[in-house]
Amino acid sequence: MAQAQTDFNLQPVVDMVGERFLTGASLLLRGRIGEGLAHTVLGMVAYTTFGLPAMLLVSANSFARAETGHNLIELATHALPHNEPATGAKKA
């Protein structure tokens, strides 16, 4: 009997668990040491200055950066609809 092959990627799960314990862990686990350490420091500063919600935001940014290569602001701006002017519009 042939086994069914699954294409389940465990890396995002490992990254998310790592972010739970250390902000920037997802970047560190992928070998992006500079970005990971920067997120770790920013996470500590955010936590001491603004509290847990700020640290979670830095962790989310780190995870998004590791998964997509884009930060949260870039992802949010790509998700918004872009209103482009109609072609042939005259300037006033």
Image (cartoon, rainbow, N blue to C red):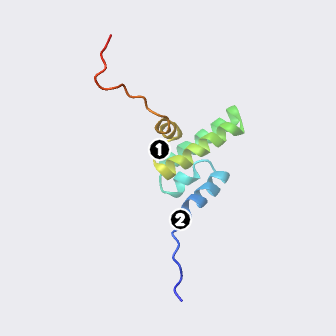
Residue at horizontal 53 percent and vertical 40 percent from the top: 72
**Could you tell me residue 70's position as x and y percent?**
47, 44
Residue occupying the far bottom of the picture: 1
Residue depicted at x 53% and y 57%: 29
Q: Which residue is mark 2?
A: 9
For the C terminus, the quadrant is top left
Q: Helix, strand, or loop for circle 1?
A: loop
Residue under label 1, please give it. 70
Quarter of the image for residue 86 reads top left
Who is closer to the viewer here, 26 or 38? 26
Q: Quadrant of the N terminus?
A: bottom right
> Please, what is the three-letter code of the amino acid marked with disc 2?
Asn
Circles 1 and 2 in contact, beta carbons < 8 Å: no
Q: Position of residue 61 (x, y in %)?
A: 56, 43
Q: Secondary structure at mark 2?
A: loop
- The three-letter amino acid code for the residue at tag 1 is His
Which quadrant would residue 8 be assigned to in this image?
A: bottom right
